[in-house]
């Protein structure tokens, strides 16, 4: 059985306790993980605080910090296979997705490596001849980064990259559900040559580890990704020492299709928008909002393609949909489908877990045209379930798209660009993809509004958000 360790102050250790990690494709316990409790959290925060003030980090030039981040990016690229295999084993995410995602994780570190020495202050033209006034940008301090189990190397990169570029130090808490990839990442980080304590990686349970970390008086900022209920705890915890927060939460993203699209390519886009990562993606296009003029023909093709998706062992190159990561995720999916059927939704395909071992749930489509109150239209599944409703007018399409408390991503499919512009203006979401879906780049900010949280990851602004401005007045 594989053993993993936590990483605090440049030292690997076992943690206060150990817990088991299961392979979601087989149910087999395959590794033992270090469980961080309050003493480990204290040690990690103390190490990050000491590193923040230590001359080898505080005195390092921004260009030198950038060079270390470039080295880290290269090491990640060299270790793609190991990281991808561990992520696939621990989370059940299919190997072709984990391998592809790790390639762009390295790109994100490269982007922030290049940004490190471009985080500039400013000189202010104050109306006083004997006064020089300028703004210094200084790092926020110690950052608590808390991430879920899905896309965790990516979600950690969009926090660690800008935070270190800005000169902060970080305590990263990996999810207890599948921490292997981030604990292995700590080993890779250790080889990059950063001073001890600049990054500390721990894992443990919400109450004993996450809550202690986010309420810790030694933390200056919390960068959190997870569900809205946990986010509420995190915000309450942050009130202890008034730490700032950025929150990347769930979604119920609309995928809006007008009657003028190319049906075949748009169906393909919808299949990957909802079934990639077995639906366990915050930006999953989980509500198909489709013109009634093409609904029947579109659904026929969608059903066919959904039924052809290859479900299987996540390690196999040909697999397109793997298992759900946890038993809890499986239970939630089953219960939410049942509640939606009770509310009048109709199964187009799927709907029942597959028999046999592992958390396999097939691609599922629920037609909610006669069930406007079905919970599947409002609650995030975090599973491979698509809810469908039809519209007759553009105004109706927009109203359906905005009928959600979330506001993360959205997709608009039409050949009519003036209509696309009206939809872009009207949609309440942090991202609008037009005639494409799930496109990401280190240069483009990413984030939501409403129950999808606040703050942005990716792009220049994310690095600036890890700094605060100091105003300097100098009489000359
Ligand atoms: P979760 O909220 O249960 O857990 C996320 C993290 O918070 C874990 O590390 C967990 O241990 C920790 N945590 C739990 N209780 C805590 C507490 N009281 N205080 C501090 N930390 C605590 O989320 P999950 O089920 O692991 O992940 C799925 C959720 O994450 C979904 O809602 C999904 O949409 C969201 N997500 C959002 C994005 C985004 O970028 N917007 C990306 C991926 C996932």
Image (tube, rainbow, N blue to C red):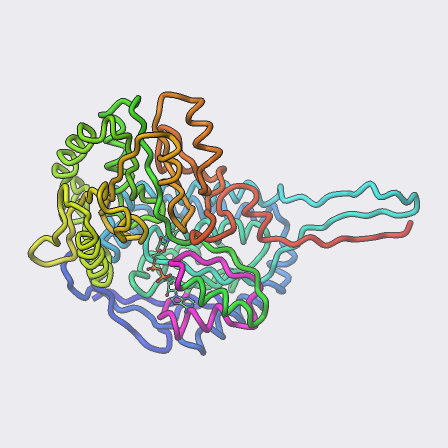
Above or below, 442 against 360 in this view is above
Q: Residue at x 18, y 45 (%)?
A: 364
Residue 159 inside the magenta-drawn segment: no
Q: Is residue 443 left or right of residue 290?
A: right
Q: Nearer the viewer, residue 363 or 144?
A: 363
Q: Position of residue 145 (x, y in %)?
A: 47, 60
Q: Is residue 33 above or below residue 456?
A: below
Q: Is residue 138 visible?
A: yes
Residue range of the region highlighted in magenta in the rendering: 202-229
Which residue occupies 45% across, 22% down? 418
Residue at 45 percent across and 42 percent down: it is 428
Residue 32, percent from left and from top: 26, 69
Ligand 1 falls in quadrant: bottom left
Q: Quadrant of the N terminus?
A: bottom left
Give yes or no for residue 224 being in the magenta stretch. yes
| Residue 301 left/right relative to 227 | left
Viewer-closest of 384 and 141: 384
224 over 18 or under it: above or below: above
Q: Residue 356 in the image: x percent, y percent?
A: 7, 57
């Amino acid at each position: 059985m594989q053993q993993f360790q936590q990483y605090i102050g440049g030292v690997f250790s076992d943690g206060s306790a150990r817990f088991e990690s299961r392979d979601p494709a087989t149910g087999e316990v395959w590794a033992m993980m270090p469980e961080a409790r309050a003493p480990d959290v204290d040690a990690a925060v103390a190490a990050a605080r000491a590193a923040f003030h230590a001359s080898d980090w505080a005195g390092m030039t921004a260009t030198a910090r950038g060079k270390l981040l470039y080295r880290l990016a290269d090491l990640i690229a060299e270790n793609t296979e190991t990281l991808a295999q561990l992520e696939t084993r621990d989370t059940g995410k299919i190997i072709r997705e984990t391998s592809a995602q790790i390639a762009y994780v390295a790109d994100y570190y490269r982007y922030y490596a290049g940004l490190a020495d471009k985080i500039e202050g400013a000189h202010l033209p104050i109306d006083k001849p004997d006064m020089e006034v300028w703004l210094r940008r200084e790092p926020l301090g110690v950052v608590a980064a808390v991430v879920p189990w899905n896309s965790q190397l990516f979600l950690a990169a969009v926090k660690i990259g800008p935070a270190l570029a800005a000169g902060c130090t970080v305590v990263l808490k990996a999810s207890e559900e599948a921490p292997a990839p981030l604990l292995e990442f700590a080993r890779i980080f250790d080889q990059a040559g950063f001073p001890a304590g600049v990054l500390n990686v721990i894992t443990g349970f919400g109450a004993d580890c996450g809550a202690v970390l986010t309420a810790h008086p030694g933390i200056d900022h919390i960068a959190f990704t997870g569900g809205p209920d946990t986010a509420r705890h995190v915000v309450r915890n942050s009130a202890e020492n008034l730490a700032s927060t950025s929150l990347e939460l769930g979604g119920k993203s609309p995928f809006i299709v007008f009657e003028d699209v190319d049906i075949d390519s748009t169906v393909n886009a919808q299949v990957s928008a909802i079934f990639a990562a077995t639906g366990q993606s915050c930006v999953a296009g989980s509500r198909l909002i489709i013109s009634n003029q093409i609904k029947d023909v579109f659904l026929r093709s969608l059903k066919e393609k959904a039924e052809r998706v290859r479900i299987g062992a996540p390690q196999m190159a040909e697999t397109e949909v793997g298992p759900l990561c946890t038993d809890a995720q499986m239970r939630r999916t089953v219960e939410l489908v049942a509640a939606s059927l009770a509310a009048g939704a109709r199964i187009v395909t799927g709907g029942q877990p597959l028999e046999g071992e592992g958390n396999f749930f097939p691609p599922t489509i629920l037609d909610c045209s006669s069930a406007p109150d079905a919970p599947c239209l409002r609650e995030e599944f975090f599973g491979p379930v698509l809810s469908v409703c039809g519209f007759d007018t553009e105004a109706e399409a927009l109203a359906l798209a905005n009928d959600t408390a979330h506001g993360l991503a959205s997709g608009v499919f039409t050949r009519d660009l003036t209509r696309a512009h009206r939809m872009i203006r009207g949609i309440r979401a942090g991202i609008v993809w037009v005639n494409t879906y799930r496109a990401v780049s280190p240069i483009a900010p990413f984030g939501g509004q409403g129950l999808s949280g606040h703050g942005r990851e990716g792009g220049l602004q994310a690095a600036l958000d890890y700094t605060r401005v100091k105003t300097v007045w100098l009489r000359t």
